[in-house]
Each structure stands twice: as structure tokens, then as C-alpha cells.
Amino acid sequence: MKAILFVALGGMVGAVGRFLSYAVAEKVFGDGFAYGTLVVNVVGCLVIGFLAGWGLILSDTNLHLRLFVMTGMLGSLTTFSTFGWETVQYLQDGRWQLAFLNISLNLLIGVAAVLGGFAAGQALLGKAVT
């Protein structure tokens, strides 16, 4: 139960961070591109890379801190950071084929899923929800 609390609290911080990042990015860069998404993805990747380099990800001594930051905060800020870390792990292990496969499948299947879900939603509702 304690672990769930740490994940939930971190998730709250990450979700608020995501919301604020989008608002700031729109004010700074405008709304002509998905700058908010780019910002949270890059920040999430930078943070998870730093924490991995620092040893937090692999350490079992700070389980609650890891659950708060990694699973909760970064998980709600962006899952792209986890995707980036997993890809780096494949590359570090010399398994570049798996790294390429991970990149390709996440990109292609992810976009296809959005298109499929959009089409299914349109078919079921007959129109966009406004």
C-alpha cells in the first residue's frame, strides 16, 4: 500500500508538471506545433537518463524514491522517457536490432493505433465530440 501511495503522489506531481509545461510551451513558442509534447518528452528523457547515470534506476536501496520519481512522476509526465531508457539499454547491451525494433514498433504501431482508434470513434459516434 505504501508503494501505491508513492506512485500516486509522484503521478500527481508529474501530471501537474505536464499541464504547466504545455501552458508554458504554448506561451513561449505558440500553438503551431506540438511543442508541449516535445518539451515533456525531452525533459523526461533527460531526467531518466540522469537518474540512470546516477544509479537511481538500478538501485534497490531507494525503492520509494524510485517509485515516486520514475513510475509516478515521470510516468505521468511522459512514458516516452521509459521508451527512451529501454532503447538505450538495448544499445548498451549491443542489441541494436532490438533497439531499432523497439523504435520502429512503438512509432508505427502507436500511430496506427491512434488512427484506428480515431476511425473507430468516428464510426461509433458518427461525428466528433465537441
Image: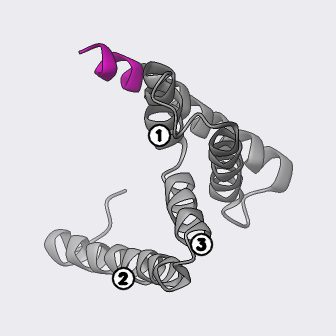
Q: Secondary structure at mark 2?
A: helix
Amino acid type at circle 2 is Ala
- Whole-angstrom CA distance, mark 2 to mark 1, is 22 Å
Residue bearing mark 2: 112
Q: Residue at point 76% right, 48% down?
A: 25
Residue bearing mark 3: 91
Amino acid type at circle 3 is Leu
Q: Nearer the viewer, residue 63 or 106?
A: 63
Q: Quadrant of the N terminus?
A: top left
Residue bearing mark 1: 76
Label 1, residues with CA under 10 Å away: few <14, some 14-19, many ≥20: many
Q: Nearer the viewer, residue 25 or 81?
A: 81
Residue 6 on image: x %, y %: 40, 19
Q: Quadrant of the C terminus?
A: bottom left
Amino acid type at circle 1 is Ser
Label 2, residues with CA under 10 Å away: few <14, some 14-19, many ≥20: few
Q: Residue at point 31% right, 74% down?
A: 118
- Whole-angstrom CA distance, mark 3 to mark 1, is 25 Å
Q: Quadrant of residue 23?
A: top right
Q: Nearer the viewer, residue 19 or 31?
A: 19
Q: Residue at point 62% right, 37% down?
A: 55
Q: Which residues are magenta?
A: 1-8
Circle nearer the N terminus (3, 1): 1
* Residue at the right extreme, as displayed: 28
